[in-house]
Amino acid sequence: MRRRFQPSGCSGQQLRIRTIEQFTKGNRNDLAEKEKKEAEILQGYLPPQMSEDDIKAEVKKAIAETGAVSQKDMGKVMKALMPRVAGKADGAVVNRLVKELIGSN
């Protein structure tokens, strides 16, 4: 079995999704199907993912707790928020929601 390079900040499931996309683009449907089946099996062992509404609620709490009012405070919000959502939410979604909500509260 070959080892795969996993870019930092990229979860195993995210890497699988990208791999499936690349196999599909390369017309290697056999390998894409194999990856899909493995991803489905592994999904059963992962914690359930938070919905966007749940993430948004946690983001609002973190903004209120840190007193963040502008994009300059994003680091404080992320520091408070990430331990709560780690492994249960996609970091890109969390980042997007923090950017959207930080100035609107």
Image: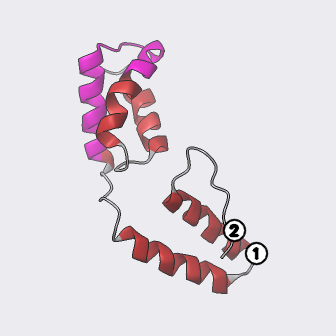
Q: As displayed, is residue 9 above or below residue 11?
A: above
Task: Check disc 2: other Cα within 10 Å, few if <14, some if 14-19, many if 20+.
Answer: some
Q: Is 27 in front, or is 48?
A: 48
Using residue 26 as the reference point, say whether residue 24 is left or right of it.
left
Question: Looking at numbered disc 2 in the image, what kind of residue is underneath it?
Answer: Gln
Tell me residue 73's x, y (percent): 42, 15
Identify the element where label 2 is drawn.
helix
Using residue 20 as the reference point, say whether residue 88 is left or right of it.
left
Identity of the residue drawn at 46% across and 36% down: 96
Please check the rendered image and state whether residue 81 is part of the magenta-colored stretch, yes or no. no
Tell me residue 105's x, y (percent): 29, 20
Question: Looking at numbered disc 1 in the image, what kind of residue is underneath it?
Answer: Gly
Identify the element where label 1 is drawn.
loop
Tell me residue 12's x, y (percent): 52, 59
Question: In the rendered view of the protein, which quadrant contains the N terminus?
Answer: bottom right
Tell me residue 92's x, y (percent): 49, 42
Start-end of magenta stretch: 53-76
Q: Is 6 in front, or is 25?
A: 6
- Cβ–Cβ under 8 Å for marks 1 and 2: yes
Identity of the residue drawn at 60% across and 45% down: 8
Q: Quadrant of residue 3?
A: bottom right
Q: As displayed, is residue 78 above or below residue 16?
A: above
Q: Mark 2 points at which residue?
A: 22
Identity of the residue drawn at 24% across and 36% down: 57
Q: How many labels does the image show?
A: 2
